Amino acid sequence: MIQSLPSDANRTIRRVQCFAAAAMVVVALVLLAHPGRAAAQQPTSPTPAPTATVAAGTGSSPTTTTAAGSGSNTLTVDLTNGKSTGAGSGPLQIILVVTIIALAPAILMLVTAFTRIVIVLGLTRNALNLQGVPPNQVLIGIALFFTIFVMAPVMEKANDEGLQPYLDGNITQQEALSKASAPFKTFMLEHVREPDLALFVDLSGKAAPADPQDIPFTTLIPAFVIGELRAAFLIGFVIYIPFLIIDIVTSGTLMSMGMVMVQPATVALPFKLLLFVLVDGWSLLAGSLIRSFGG
């Protein structure tokens, strides 16, 4: 049996080689039988060249037009106004869309309630001393839908005042952007702390505007973010206190019993989970987070 293994392996290798050689022969025969098929499928008509139209001067001055070949591709360049129409506008639109998509996560985290909610949920998981439960994906998903719930009135107002009129063609793109961003600015102004806002207004080196709506986003967003971090840490501190008491009591009990080799966190975890379930912790946490935004 031991000596038959090499012969079996050699026999298998020979079969594979024979199969590959047979496949190559079949492909060669097919190519030789139809040598002109690829050439026959090539178009015989010449490719139309693009037409270029160049306009110079204004008023009644003549227009210079340069045309090469025939076809449907046309590029018009107005040398007087410095504008171009045709294929040149496509790349700029693609760059703009890609930029907006790249900045969308940052905008979501920094101008909405997402920052406070996700930090509080993360601190709650750490206070329970759970190793990755719930997972990060679940935690971020919960924070995302909590954010959608909190920001629903703001998003509806931005849609009604900015997006829908622009899609209907009633306002320009600049007006749509201004009207759609106004509800988010109002939301941030309602929850920003005055000391934080005054700090960044002073750091910008510009005079404080008389109307808070005139504060630029470059000044308002950093002030709003640090206020959200402060609020999230305060809520996390309150959440930590009962679980910290459980850790202290468990540690003291184990020390008094002489069980120094037992990890206090392992013994305290079931009591933390029991306490969290008895007080209906998730409902209490969700209600507190949403009410902190005036919901």
Image (spheres, rainbow, N blue to C red):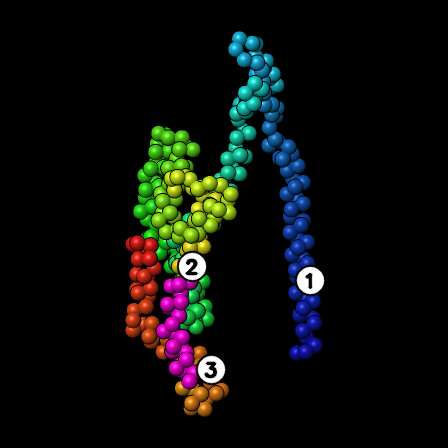
Quadrant of the frame with the C terminus: bottom left
Whole-number angstrom distance, CA of label 3 to CA of label 2: 32 Å
User: Is 260 situated left or right of 183 in this image?
Assistant: right
Which amino acid lies under the numbered mark 1 shown in the image of this protein? Arg
Question: In the rendered structure, which segment of residues is drawn in magenta?
Answer: 233-252
Instruction: Name the residue: 50% across, 44% down.
Output: 204
Q: Label 2 belongs to which residue?
A: 230
User: Is 83 situated left or right of 220 in this image?
Assistant: right
User: Is 156 situated left or right of 78 in this image?
Assistant: left
Q: Residues within 10 Å of mark 1 (few under 14, many from 20)?
A: few
State the image coordinates of residue 69 (x, y, percent, origin top left): 60, 19
Which amino acid lies under the numbered mark 2 shown in the image of this protein? Arg
Whole-number angstrom distance, CA of label 2 to CA of label 1: 73 Å
Q: Label 3 belongs to which residue?
A: 263
The reply to whether residue 112 is visible in this rendering is: no
Q: Quadrant for residue 14, please give it.
A: bottom right
Q: Which circle marks residue 14 in the picture?
A: 1
Instruction: Name the residue: 68% across, 58% down.
Output: 17
Instruction: Name the residue: 44% across, 87% down.
Output: 255
**Mark 2: which secondary structure?**
helix
| Residue 151 drawn above or below residue 275 | above
Which amino acid lies under the numbered mark 3 shown in the image of this protein? Gln
- Specify whether residue 235 is painted magenta: yes
**Mark 1: which secondary structure?**
helix
| Residue 8 drawn above or below residue 208 | below
